[in-house]
Image: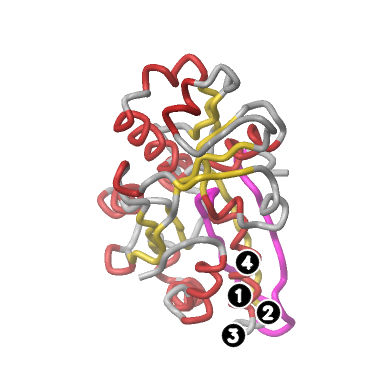
Amino acid sequence: MWRGLFLAVGAVLGVAHAAENLSVAAAANFLPALASLHAEFAKSSPGLQVTTATGASGSLVAQITHGAPFDVFLSADLDYPRALVAAGHADAKSLTTFAFGRLVLWTARPGVEVADVVTTVRSPAVKKLAIANPATAPYGRAARQALEKFGVWADAQPKLVVGENISQTAQFVETGNADAGFVALSLLLSPPLQDRGRWRAVPAELHAPLTHGVVLTTRGAANPAAVRYLAFLRSAAAKKILRDFGYDVP
């Protein structure tokens, strides 16, 4: 289901203004919501061709830094877009918080309980525990912070299966390659996973806030479609879609 580090989707939205293009780089946790967001955006931008790539926020930043032609960057934190601004690869005035994510502990395996993080981590039934790469994926970083606060980071390490991004991490749990894992709530509210297994929210006070930021790249700042997309994310319609996928919104 969630295949690979990147998902490239090219779709022509509408029939007018076909020459207009928009390239969006999005953290992997946004993957389930993107189709709905872009379908809604298409109502006001007929004919716009949108191309989307998803992956770990840190990996996408590396691509943008090395010249990848993205107009908009949707990050799972604020640090990565701020780094792009500091390096001269993004427009400082465009940096905006548009959503807040939620980390959950999830299992698709019968007999594994996730009501208590400490018990789950130490359970003999949990031989493999999935986590996104804390070095590049904000949800992975949040999971490590929570495990450290619970005092079970050392217990967890021998069991860890590390995903390149949060979508791959969810795939490990979904396919049974991990007995449980820390994933984004947004993934579990998507149709393929919403009725799979059991999950428990990780208390937000146990990790740094998953504050999701959007920024226009220097290329995107000159693209009228990117400017419109940034405004769209602040609209009531976009906020409703984000709430439906488990995000809090400003």
Q: Using the image, determine if residue 35 lies above or below residue 19.
A: above
User: Residues in magenta?
Assistant: 5-29
- Residue 42 in which image quadrant: bottom right
Label 1, label 4: how far apart the Cα atoms are: 9 Å
Cα–Cα span, label 4 and label 2: 9 Å
Q: Nearer the viewer, residue 112 or 173?
A: 112
Alpha carbon separation for disc pair 3 and 1: 13 Å
* Residue 49 left/right relative to 123: right
Disc 2 secondary structure class? loop
Q: Secondary structure at mark 3?
A: loop
Disc nearer the start of the sequence (3/1): 1
Q: In the image, what residue occupies the spot 37% across and 23% down?
A: 153
Residue receiving disc 1? 20
Which mark sits nearer the N-terminus, 3 or 4?
A: 3
Q: Residue at x 52, y 27 (%)?
A: 162
Split into 4 quadrants, where in the image is the N terminus? top right
Query: Pointer 3 and pointer 1: residues touching (CB < 8 Å)?
Result: no
Q: Amino acid at mark 2?
A: Gly
**Which numbered disc, 2 or 3, marks the residue closer to the eye?**
3
- Residue 168: x and y in percent read 61, 37
The secondary element bearing badge 1 is classed as loop
Q: Which residue is mark 2?
A: 47
Q: Amino acid at mark 3?
A: Ser
The residue that disc 3 covers is: 44
Which dot, 1 or 4, sits closer to the camera?
A: 4
Residue 148, percent from left and from top: 32, 29
What residue is shown with label 4? 50
- Mark 3 or 4: in front is 3
**Which label lies toward us, 3 or 1?**
3
Name which residue lies at 32% across and 51% down.
Answer: 209
Instruction: Check disc 1: other Cα within 10 Å, few if <14, some if 14-19, many if 20+.
Output: some
Towards the viewer: 230 or 103: 103
